[in-house]
Image (cartoon, coloured by chain):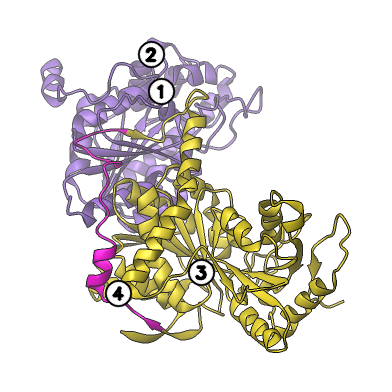
Chain colours: A yellow, B purple
Amino acid sequence: MKKVIIGNHAVSWGVALARAEVIAAYPITPQTQIVEELAEMCSDGRLAARFIKVESEHSAMAACIGASAAGVRAFTATSSQGLLLMHELLHWAGLGRLPIVMADVNRAVAPGWNIWTDQNDTLAQRDTGWVQLYCENNQEVLDTTVQAFRLAETLNLPVMIVLDAFFLSHTSEPVDIPEPADVDAFLPRRETDLKLDVANPRAFGALTTPAVYMEMRMRQQEAFDRVHEAYGAIDAEWGSRFGRTWGAIEPYRMEGAETVLVTSGTVTSTARHVVNERRAQGEKVGLLKIKMFRPFPTRALREALAGVPRVAVLDRNISPGHGGIFAEELRSALYDVAEPLRPQVDGYVIGLGGRDVTPAVIGECLDRTRGNGSSSPVREDEWVGVKP
Amino acid sequence: MTQTLIKDAIPRRELLDSGHLACPGCGAALAMRMVLKGLGERTMVSLPACCWSIIAGPYPQSSLKVPLYHTAFETGASVASGIKAALLARGDTQTTVVAWAGDGGTFDIGLQALSGAAERNEDILYVCYDNEAYMNTGIQRSSATPFGAWTTTTPGTHTKSHPKKDILAILAAHRVPYAASATLAYPEDLMAKVTRAKETHGMRFLHVLAPCPPGWKSEDSETIALSRLAVQSRVFPLVEIEDGETWRVTVEPDGTPVAEYLRRQGRFRQLGEDEVRAIQEQVDERWALIERRVAGG
């Protein structure tokens, strides 16, 4: 069934198809429509979930933690300040190995108040032990939402679906909505023995001494090491059932490319347009979209970019005192690529606080990198599209 | 007579194992033992940071024979809400979900989540075992610490200058179906309240005084005696409240002077006569307020 829906409702439909059993949420712009739609679905019977209308995002995540620990499928959604308030409990869900799924609508952080998109809210949660999946369009949002539950429950890791404020959250696009029975076959009800159970009483999260804590951390890391393979299989199965796959990364028009744009989120769609135009003019440019930020797809990126002379990373985020975060991560990932094959990686900070990232802005990044024949040993990320 | 009553009133089952890590004379450990006796095996516990995070035992051990989820300091009520929703989602309406928190996790950092759960009338039992300070971190004042008490953050002559927060009145203002106070000195009263709480639907709140020998600078053997004195001196009246409206005193105090209660605890050692008199006045005022509420005023 095709429907024209906004990105926020694509999340809601995905959650309904996944038959989430407990939803706990608190309103925040621009996420609110996700949970409004879910509240409607719960009230009119389309979704048989318990919806806890908590008094803060902190309690939203806490309630999801309780529900997930008791063995059911739990979901929440938030944005920006709400995600930051949850921070403590994101670690709890991560190290507690609870397969909670959360949608975050990327919104800039305050002050000053800003409801528009950038990635600093989610990237500030980088080390909390959540898988992070960034989406480019509403179809990808819906598909990723359902996939996220399967991935989370396969490895006992929480998964965050990320979509841009307004450019996706409030933008209507045609979305193919799978049949519920087909999704049920892909994603059966969650069953686990690792839960609170009066028939088998156990304590979870007790005091963990130096004699055991490190191994617990290592098991978490080992689970993350399995994400790429697991997601590949889940995505391939999704493709065989529903005819679409997304990939942890997506190379686009990379054949013979001498300069490659690296993007995430909706900037990718604009970058596709720029690459098409440049290709039409005979320029050897390509595009690489990163969907999965955690775990970072290091091996796939090395394979995709080894031998490419120049890479321009578009970062809709900033790590103050360092630079764009995707660029940092990519440089680190490519460091082990042997010298003649290792690309030059230029970082560009763009589009913060929802500033428009136009084809002209992306073109400027591309041109700066194409013109950067000789790079100095240490080069700082450049800001493009800012006023003097 | 009393012996027989207690024997009949207290179930024999033990859901707290003897290998727990509480200090000698710990009121919190006894409180858990008694409350679980009343609730039975079909119970799950949400346990935010508090002394009980230690008492329950380190991984992979547990001193409880019921499922236990350790969680962050301010999330006792919110995690319990999630557990209850999950059980209901799978059709389990019988298991009692308990949030078990200290006074810091209840009066201070967990108050918002507690208020949210109370307002939503979550079908959970919230038990606050109140040792009147942050004892697990080494005796720092909380908003449950009484006026005049020494703690490491109210040291020397700078003892606690504000009275204890009235947590029961706060819960009553949420009009929760059932709220009550209890102590270890009156186990039949405590057990009756646990049973009442277990059988009530919606948000239930139990406030249990939990003497702490290291924090109160009291004798290990005085925990029950201090619990009784707290009740008789009206420092800690035993009440129960239905729907936030109907107040009832369940054990009538004899009005023992508060000085009797204070002088047996090192944390009040520095108090002079004027301060003791001031505390007596505060206690009398709150007692008068409770009497007005009991009378429906």
- Distance of label 4 from label 1 (alpha carbons): 49 Å
Foreground mark, 1 or 3?
3
Identify residue type, mark 2: Glu
Q: Which residue is mark 3?
A: A28
Q: Which residue is mark 1?
A: B211
Q: State the residue in front, B135 or A307.
A: A307
Q: Which residue is mark 2?
A: B222
Q: Is disc 4 on the same chain as disc 3? A: yes
**Which range of residues does the magenta coloring cover?**
A175-202
Provide residue B194's location: percent of width, then percent of height: 22, 36
Tell me, yes or no, whether the two marked residues, 4 and 1, touch with CB atoms within 8 Å: no
Q: Quadrant of residue A64?
A: bottom left
**Quadrant including the C terminus of chain A:** bottom right
Q: Residues within 10 Å of mark 3 (few under 14, many from 20)?
A: some
Q: Secondary structure at mark 1?
A: loop
Q: Is disc 3 on the same chain as disc 1? A: no
Tell me, yes or no, whether the two marked residues, 1 and 3, touch with CB atoms within 8 Å: no
- Distance of label 3 from label 2 (alpha carbons): 51 Å
